[in-house]
Image: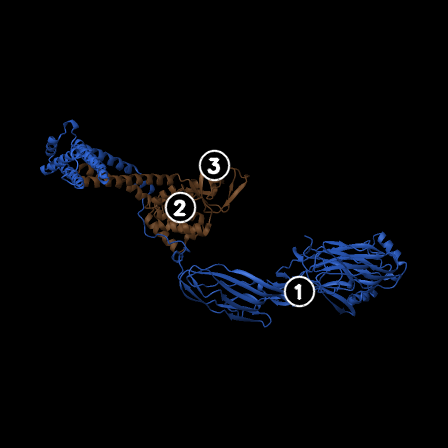
Amino acid sequence: MKRIVLFSVFLLLISALNAQVDFTASADYSSIPSNGRVNVTFSLKGANAEIFNKPTFEGFRVVSQQSYTGGGNMQVIINNQIVQNNNGESKWIFALVPKSTGSFTVGPAKVKVGGQWYSSNTVTINVTSGGQAVSNGNNTQRKQGNTQPQQSATQNDNNAVFIRAIPSKTRVYLGEQITVSYRIYTLYDISQYGVDKTPGMDGFWIEELTDPTQKAKTWEETIGGKRYMVGEFRLVSLIAQKSGVLTIPSLDIEAIVQIPDQRMSNPFAVFDQFFNNLFGASNSDPYAGFGSRTEKRILKSNPVEMVVVDLPEAGKPESFSGAVGNFEVDAKLDRNKCFTGDGVSLKITVSGSGNLPLLEWLEQEWPVGFEVFDPDITDDFQKTATGIQGTRTFEYLLQPTIPADYQIDLGMFSYFDPASGQYHTLSLPEIKLKVLQGNGSKVSAEKKIADDILHIHESIPHFTKSENTFAFSGWYWAILVALFVAFGGLLFYFRSRIQLRADVAGFRMRMALKQARKRLSVAGNCLAKNDVVGFYSELSKALWLYLNEKFTIPFSELSHSNAREILRKSSVPDSIGDDFAAILEECDYARFAPDSGRMNMNELYLKSTDLIVKVQTHSIQST
Amino acid sequence: MKRKIAFVLFLMATWNVSWANIQPDSLFQEASNSYNSKNYQQAIAQYLLLLTDGYSSNDDVFYNLGNAYYRNGNVALAIWSYEKCLLLNGANSDAQVNLDFLNNSALGDQESVPENFFNYFWKSIYSLMSWKWWTISVIISLAIAIGLFLMFLLSAQAQRRRIFFVLAVLLAFVFILSLAQSVSGHFRMKNNKYAIVLSEAATIKSSPDTNGTSIAVLMPGVKVKIVEDKNPWIEIIAPDGSTGWMLESELLPLSATIPSL
């Protein structure tokens, strides 16, 4: 949870080279006193080092070393969010303390990148027995900021390093976007600092604008005759969410400040420093150079008061939905012709600067025949020094269900311009969409999903108490039983009539007909196969069997002579009986004297089928 | 029970009616008027009074009660009322529409184990007419079946005999179906195995114990199946098929005649 912002120790200006791999060495001082300290930085740009071999630092003692590996390996944490440092720069920083006086050459260091070794340039540092540190020529800014305050450092130390919060405006409208810049003013070197405590900003919506991958913006300012180094370490965009007087609380940062020692020129100062360190009188770290001491300081910014004014009621348009700033709107359909059931995307884009991240689109009235889904919101914001700018896109998915030519009125968009203090209303372009009947979507058009319950039933029903209901009551069961009893009674009453009507032999007769047809069908098969002998024998067999089963007469009593008699007894007309006998005779003839057939086989087959049906109907009518 | 009586007495006092002269027709009319004048609380009380007074065999009372509950903001009791209405009269399509609407809008798409085909088929047949008509159909179909059978026995012509026989068999089938439907409908009403979750965010426990692990949280209005009743815990099967235990007080069984008060 510790919020730490690490910035590069020294604001080195490293010349950018176009080379693919740029490996350079630099020192912050070209000449230092023997009790001074020099930082040598090896910087690798445009590649990631596999191996780094540090050089031998002849004549120096390494008091500290730090490395920043770029290319995504360095994590910078701001407001609990991990921000990758992707500037592709790796740094190895060595703090060196000279062992003796003279001119020493540091380097070269070597790195292995992509299997190849690269060497850095060398740096020459003069160690003098006394005097001042001379920084590298290209770093004049630092020199000035560094040397000047030395005279007044001890006298007015409180003003030497401080931070300030500077709002872009202190009187704002509700919803107006402002920026607050946090700047550090310093006369000394600051080796490292981190935000100790970010205040919770009640009543504001905050967005960090500082890009952690970029170096802090620095410049010089003269305050009270002193030239300060100014670094903007944090820039936030604020949008006031409630009206009244709001306070932006102070922000605390922890900085490690290198205070140049006044007694540096005094040869005995070394011992003072030594004893100071020994007894822990200062917070300086043991490796600190003898020329300066480091000190941890908690710096507090000034709290800022903001007056937030409500938006004026006068002239507030109906379509106003809280947009404050300066905007433009546009609406676009992805096509202007579609089929029912298709999805059409409608993009409403609001671009400009202001409270875009808080912008909501008003509920839209859609024409009947559309299913509209909640919009997807996509943002394209740029963080600029004046706040957030960009576009917010509301993408609606429209699903037409009824084919027609539509003209969709998207209404108006209104915003409040805090610069002029006036409302502006923009009208959105009218959207035209031609919807054709698609296949399979008729169902969805007709199947309207109920959006409310149906009304109550108001017609008064016939009320009966549940204990008085007829269903399953004693009476109910009594009636059921009574029905069965009545059925039994009627069966008994009509028993003789029923027996008379229900001819027991009827069933057998119908079975006989079926049997005969089956038999005849066997004969039919023979006919189809032109099996003459089989046909006649099967035919006669079927007819005899029919008589046997139909009139329940045993085979022993059946003969050619009495067949006619039997039929007559069953009140079958004589003509049918004659035909029957004729067919039986014909079969016998044919069986014993084939090829003499007087009757066609086919004709015979049809005739016998017809005959059985005739006998059948006559015999049933008679019973 | 005491509370129920107390509630009824309270209703009596409120509507100034006595035991003797509850006029169901005028009370129903009054309740509809209360509903139409958006006085849903009063409408609920009046419908409940009809139910407590024994007029609980009419599906329209439950249907209107469900509407009043929904308008009054109580989805779970509305669902219960519609379910009760559909038990009495499966052919009340308005109740089915409203129940589907509530299930869709209030409960959303729930994962549920599909009902087996036979149950679905059986219930679809049940919803051809109200339970009352199923019971009447038993008597009517039996009477006609007996008549047709006698006609079959007494007629002489084969053609007629055949027709009467087929019709008699058909009506006998209708009789058996009606009897089965009315008996199963009767038991569904009296010993219904389902209950509606009433309480907000009711948790299913793995065991009948307040310290048992919570398996799931059910929304009010969800229909659960009762497996076992171990007062005050009830073992239930949730619509998604998971089983667990719930407190009896969190549920309103469909076998209840009026919502517990």
Task: Work out whether A372 lies above or below B198.
Answer: below
Q: Find residue A417 and report its horizontal and vertical position in percent.
A: 57, 70
Q: Find residue A250 and report its horizontal and vertical position in percent.
A: 69, 60
Lateral position of residue A315 relative to residue A543, left or right = right
Mark 3, residues whose alpha carbon is within 10 Å: few (<14), some, or many (≥20)?
few
Residue marked by disc 2: B83
* Residue A281 in sight here: yes
In the figure, residue B139 lies in which quadrant? top left
Rendered hue of chain B is brown
The chain letter under disc 1 is: A
Rendered hue of chain A is blue
The chain letter under disc 2 is: B
Q: Kindly identify the amino acid type of the residue bearing the numbered disc 3.
A: Asn
Instruction: Specify the farthest residue to the bottom.
Output: A420
Q: Kindly identify the amino acid type of the residue bearing the numbered disc 1.
A: Val
Residue marked by disc 1: A180
Secondary structure of the residue carrying numbered label 1: strand
In the figure, residue A451 lies in which quadrant? bottom left
Mark 2, residues whose alpha carbon is within 10 Å: few (<14), some, or many (≥20)?
many
Image marks 3 and 2: residues in contact by CB distance under 8 Å: no
Residue marked by disc 3: B231
Instruction: Specify the farthest residue to the right.
Output: A267
